[in-house]
Amino acid sequence: MLAYLIRRLINAVITLLVVTAVTFGIFFAIPKAIGSDPALLYIGKQSDPAAIAGISAKMGFDDPIVVQYGKFLKGIVAGRDYANGPDVTHCPAPCLGYSFATDQEVTPLLLEDLPVTLSLALGAAVLWVILGVATGVLSALRRGTFVDRAAMTTALAGVSLPIYFTGLLASAIFVYWLEWLPQGNYVPFTENPGEWFTSLILPWITLAFLFAATYARLTRANMLETLGEDYVRTARAKGLRERTVIGKHALRSGLTPLVTVFGLDLGALLGGAVLTESVFNLRGLGYQALTAIRQSDLPIILGVTLIAAFFIVFANLVVDLVYGWIDPRVRLA
């Protein structure tokens, strides 16, 4: 098990290094190759040449791209100094640079938005797993009945309808028409847990509706396949209760493939649910990334991309470890 863990950790580190190199190259090497100066984005096109040259020297835009990437990695691990003569600015680790739009450190900005995205993603994940798996199991056990058709029709609608449609429709019904939920922005959990919950319940349900539909369809397909296996028929022939057959034998095997899907979905959402955050005005990582794209704020976009990559790689690492614990044969792969 230790060797398996070490191999997965090495693969995760290599993957993150490749992602950082490719992302950094896209945001800084390609613009430089086509003659676009990042200093103009940082200081503005109306600035004088001396100011542009000073910013280029301080931020390292004049260095070769390999040197810039090396300094960027060093900043993530050990911090970085931005110097132009006596003007020295220290950026503590993990340093992701400074925003072109606000001249603020990128890392504190993203860490300030991270709790919003974490609250949204984790809360929605709990809902979509419970609702999706329960609906899929019920649909498989009632195959061909009205319950099965109604559940799969609802799941098809959830997969097909875009999040900005369901989000706006849910807000119109539950906030403005029925007035069951208040209209307001995100409230931190530490300030008021009750308002935190009410500010997120509608985004949770809307986002969970999209993912629960997919999980219901996958669970139904896996359960139908598992229920036809010999060991399930043997368990029933032994006289075990149906609850034990379904919960201990069929469901455990049927849910194993969903572990991988859940890891990818949750990891991607932890990097920012752009549409959901935009619809409900939640200022998380996705909202921050969208704003940065509009302003051509490359360090912010780069930081959000790397955080998303980290969560996806981390989620895959956890999935690999769970697989290794569930099925010892995976450790030999």
Image (tube, helix red, strand yellow):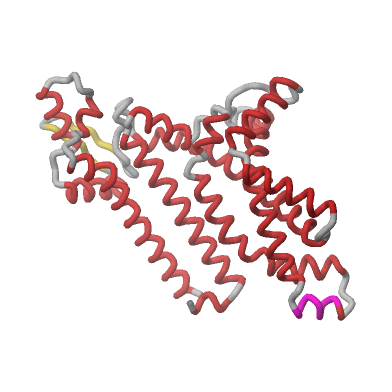
User: In the rendered image, which quarter is residue 253 located in?
Assistant: bottom right
In the rendered image, is residue 68 in sight? yes
Q: Position of residue 91 (x, y in %)?
A: 28, 37
Say which residue appears at 17% left-offset and 49% top-offset: 67
Number of residue marks: 0
Specify whether 275 is left or right of 166.
left
Above-or-below relation of 109 to 1: above
Residue 64: horizontal and vertical position, in percent? 14, 46
Image quarter of residue 99: top left
Judge by depth and name the residue closer to the eye, 47 or 194: 47
The residue lying at 72 percent from left, 49 percent from top is: 131
- Magenta residue check for 154: no
In this view of the protein, which residue sits in the foreground, 55 or 234? Answer: 234
Residue 8, position as x, y percentages in the image: 44, 67
On screen, residue 265 versus residue 199, left or right, reads: left
Q: Relative to the observer, which residue lies in front, 110 or 276?
A: 276
Q: Is residue 333 above or below residue 178?
A: below
Relative height, residue 53 to residue 10 (above, below): above
Majority SS type along the magenta span: helix
Report the residue at 63% width, 47% height from top: 211
Q: Which residues are magenta?
A: 230-236
Is residue 70 shown left or right of residue 22? left
Q: Is residue 124 in view from this perspective?
A: no
Residue drawn where x is 71% and y is 69% of the image? 225
Residue 185 drawn at (x, y percent): 58, 25
